């Protein structure tokens, strides 16, 4: 299944995470003109990775 962006609002907790600058630039370019925030993209990407990783 391909990764698809979707809007989502859920109960959250703040976590601090550091991203390499080139990754931030790639993410920002990917979400340009999309209805998703940086945090929303990261959350969806993590959920996708967890659902599709080999056990």
Image (cartoon, grey):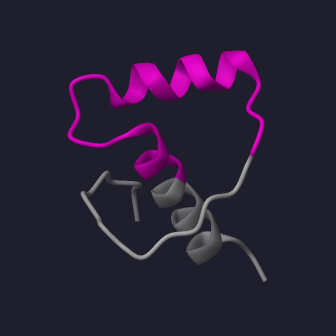
Q: Position of residue 8 (x, y in %)?
A: 29, 64
In the image, residue 24 sits, relative to residue 44, either above or below, namely above
What secondary structure predominates along the stretch shown in magenta? Answer: helix
Residue 26 placement, left or right of 31: right
In the image, residue 15 sits, relative to residue 12, either above or below, namely above
Q: Residue furthest front?
A: 14
Magenta-drawn segment: 17-42
Looking at the picture, tell me which residue is in the foreground, 50 or 8: 8
Q: Is residue 4 magenta?
A: no
Q: What residue appears at the point 48 percent right and 46 percent down from the top-left corner? A: 39
On the rendered image, what quadrant is the C terminus found in? bottom right
Looking at the picture, tell me which residue is in the foreground, 17 or 55: 17
In the image, residue 9 sits, relative to residue 30, either above or below, namely below
On the rendered image, what quadrant is the N terminus found in? bottom left
In the image, residue 54 sits, relative to residue 18, either above or below, namely below
Q: What residue appears at the point 42 percent right and 76 percent down from the top-left corner? A: 11
Q: What residue appears at the point 77 percent right and 24 percent down from the top-left corner? A: 20
């Amino acid at each position: 299944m391909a990764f698809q962006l979707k809007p989502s609002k859920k109960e959250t907790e703040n976590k601090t995470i550091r991203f390499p600058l080139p990754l931030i630039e790639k993410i920002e370019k990917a979400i340009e003109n999309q209805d998703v925030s940086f945090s929303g993209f990261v959350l969806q990407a993590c959920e996708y990775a967890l659902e599709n990783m080999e056990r």
